[in-house]
Amino acid sequence: MTMLLLVGSLLVTLCASASVPSSEILIDATVTCGTTRTVAKEGTSILIGTGNSSFADCSFIFTADGVQGCAPTALCYMFDMYAFFANPKASLSIESGTEVLKYDDSLKIPRGPVCTEHQKLTAVMTEEAGYEFDPLKPEEAYRFRLSVYNRCGSKGQVKNIEFEEAVKKVSGYHPKGEREEREHNTFVTGIVLGFGLACIFLVVLFAGYCYTRNSPNRPPGRSVGMPKGKEDIAMTSTSGKM
């Protein structure tokens, strides 16, 4: 029964993946420059920069598939949060209509979706003369995952927000003042709780002491917990001799 459930879950996952097409283009020495992708309504094309393409200029063309009743037919794109361009001789240009944005070490990478007004989008990866990739120092090169998707799809309805604003929407996030107040309240609550438990322990200990002190089985003429007197020691010795 468990095996059937696992197989069923796998089939559902495969069907869901097939219904939302996604293709990846890895920019390396084997990539085909000039590659063209048509992006369906719910589809996504991902351009992956690894830091080493071995090409001076390599372009990739993305075209939005038309959707009936949706206008404009256009594309959106978004970088992953870890994208960076550390080497000044490497850059990625996004061309949409007459607008060209060149992302390099001097231009801040947007940490949110960017939607265009055009059906066609061209991404050009450039490695200028003198650029060298050191596999031992990948942090000195560039790396990114650029997701290109149809503006008419569900992902195209996402509000264009900054990454910092998106972080605030994550569950569990609290502003600095609220976080400090919450930590202070937690600290005070811990002290009050510890003091209360200590009082309960002392009350129980005192009640036990009072009960033992007034117990009818307690030997007369001596307080509980007090050391034996000389008479008690003598009586004990005499009993031992008898």
Image (cartoon, helix red, strand yellow):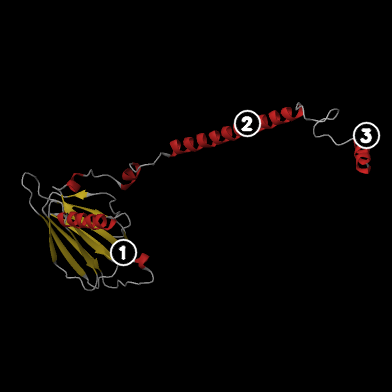
In the displayed image of the protein, which residue is found farthest to the front? 242
The Cα–Cα distance between marks 1 and 2, rounded to whole angstroms, is: 63 Å
Residue nearer the viewer, 93 or 49: 49
Where is residue 235 shown, x and y percent of the image?
Answer: 92, 36
**Mark carried by residue 204:** none
Q: Quadrant of residue 49?
A: bottom left
Q: Given this view, does label 1 or label 2 mark the residue nearer the observer?
A: 2
Q: Earlier in the sequence, mark 1 or mark 2?
A: 1
- On residue 142, the disc is 1
Residue on which the image places disc 2: 200
Closest to the camera, between mark 1 and mark 3, is: 3
- Is 31 positioned to the left or the right of 202 in the image? left
Q: Residues within 10 Å of mark 2 (few under 14, many from 20)?
A: few
Q: Secondary structure at mark 2?
A: helix
Q: Which residue is mark 3?
A: 231
**Res. 103 in view:** no
Residue type at the position of mark 3 = Glu
**Residue 110 vs residue 190: left or right?**
left
Asked whether disc 3 touches disc 2, contact meaning CB atoms under 8 Å apart, the reply is no
Please identify the residue farthest to the left as the structure is shown: 68
Q: Tell whether label 2 touches label 1 (CB within 8 Å).
A: no
Any part of residue 114 in sight: yes
Q: Looking at this view, is 94 or 80 the one in front? A: 80
Q: Position of residue 39 (x, y in %)?
A: 13, 56
Residue visible at 6% across and 44% down in the picture:
69
**Distance from the alpha carbon under mark 1 to that under mark 3:** 94 Å
Mark 3 surroundings within 10 Å by alpha-carbon count, few (fewer than 14), some (14 through 19), many (20 or more): few
Which numbered mark, 3 or 2, is in the foreground of this view?
3
Q: Is residue 43 left or right of residue 233?
A: left
